Amino acid sequence: MTIADRVAVRLRVNGEDVAVMVPPYKTLLEVLREDLGLTGTKHGCELGECSTCGVLVDGRPFLSCLAMPLDLEGREIITVEGMANGSEPHPLQVAFAELGAAQCGYCTPAMLLTARALLDRNPQPTRDAIKEALSGVLCRCTGYLKIFEAVELAASRQKRRG
């Protein structure tokens, strides 16, 4: 592949502007993992069915395996690496760790980001709202109970902080 086979893509990822030269057919998932080294975003089905490749684009859950980076220039992309505030983990990350909600960890980045989007728009969701929000992210390990409890714990802690 020559440089002529690549296109310049400018993205805003985790609060930083980045520019990469990539083949135009590369997905956002591939660019994040292979070109930017953000391996928290996982390869799953690559068909948009499991959501393990989930990231946030402009604060909303987005399937990176189906997204073309050129279509996302100028938009805010958040990966699991961008959830923490410096060295301080996001309250959802703390709750997932405390309750053992990570299980094998493969779906966890997408679960965390999807839950963050939920709490950003609905700080006190019901269990049904949590179930609905996370229903598109498939966990193949076991049940979702600890995940739901972790989201509820993070929401309750945010409420106490005001």
Image (cartoon, grey):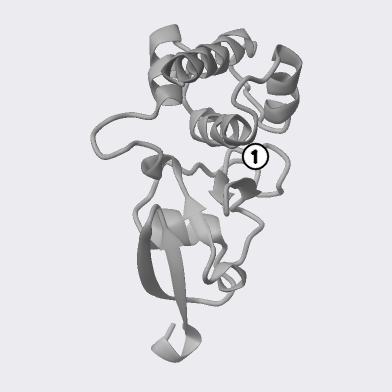
Q: Residue at x 26, y 40 (%)?
A: 86
25 or 10, nearer to the observer = 10
SS for dot 1: loop
55 or 124, nearer to the observer = 124
Q: Quadrant of residue 68?
A: bottom right
Residue type marked 1? Ser
- Which quarter of the rendered picture does the N terminus lie within? bottom left
Q: Residue furthest front?
A: 162
3 or 119, nearer to the observer = 119
In the image, residue 94 lies at what x, y percent?
38, 19
| Crowding near the residue tagged with mark 1, few <14, some 14–19, many ≥20 C-alpha atoms within 10 Å | many
84 or 142, nearer to the observer = 84
Circle 1 residue: 51
Q: Is residue 73 left or right of residue 91?
A: right
Q: Quadrant of residue 88?
A: top left
Q: Residue at x 38, y 73 (%)?
A: 19
In the image, residue 145 lies at what x, y percent?
62, 8
Residue 29 against residue 107 in the figure, above or below:
below
Residue 132 against residue 23 in the figure, above or below:
above
Q: Residue at x 42, y 53 (%)?
A: 33
Q: Residue at x 63, y 32 (%)?
A: 118
Residue 130 against residue 45 in the figure, above or below:
above
Q: Is residue 1 left or right of residue 66?
A: left
In the image, residue 147 lies at what x, y percent?
57, 16
Q: Residue furthest left?
A: 87
Residue 16 against residue 2 in the figure, above or below:
above
Tell me how many marks there are: 1
In the image, residue 110 lies at what x, y percent?
55, 35
